[in-house]
Image (cartoon, rainbow, N blue to C red):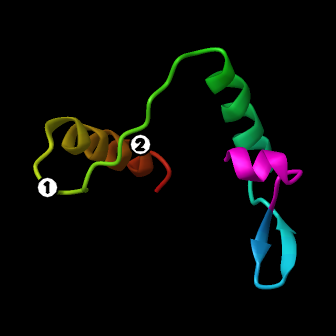
Amino acid sequence: MPGWKRNGWRRREGKSWKPVKNVEFWQTLDELLAAHEVRFTVVKGHSGHPENERCDELAVAAAQQFK
């Protein structure tokens, strides 16, 4: 995301620059992150990690609301 912001919310696609999709979402997230100390950690999905499994449950439940 810092690269997108630095490049005017655009990303490389082949030899050209394209606008970042859902830019309003990413800009809002960027503003929120600036106000808090946040650390992201990559966790292998569906590997039995308790917090990841809980997040998966919540995501599935939220998606069900839109069916």
Residue 30's spot in the image, x, y percent?
Answer: 70, 33
| Label 1 element class | loop
Report which residue position mark 1 lands on: 47
Residue 12's spot in the image, x, y percent?
Answer: 77, 72
Q: Which residue ends up furthest to the left in the rendered image?
A: 48
- Give the quadrant of residue 24: top right
Residue 62 magenta-drawn?
Answer: no
Q: Amino acid at mark 1?
A: Ser
Residue closest to the eye, 9 or 6? 6
The image shows residue 62, relative to residue 18, as above or below, that is above
Of the two numbered discs 2 and 1 on the same chain, state the one appearing first in sequence. 1
Few, some or many residues within 10 Å of mark 1 (<14, 14–19, 20+): few
Residue at image point 85% right, 54% down: 7
Q: Is residue 29 left or right of residue 11?
A: left
Mark-to-mark CA distance, 2 and 1:
21 Å
Residue at image point 14% right, 55% down: 47
Q: Amino acid at mark 2?
A: Ala
Callouts 2 and 1 close, C-beta under 8 Å: no
Q: Nearer the viewer, mark 2 or mark 1?
A: 1
Q: Which mark is residue 23?
A: none
Residue 49's spot in the image, x, y percent?
Answer: 15, 44
| Label 2 element class | helix
Residue closest to the eye, 64 or 29? 29
Which residue range is magenta in the image? 1-10
Residue at image point 30% right, 40% down: 55
Few, some or many residues within 10 Å of mark 2 (<14, 14–19, 20+): few
Q: Is residue 40 left or right of residue 37?
A: left
- Give the quadrant of residue 25: top right
Q: Which mark is residue 62?
A: 2
Residue at image point 33% right, 43% down: 61
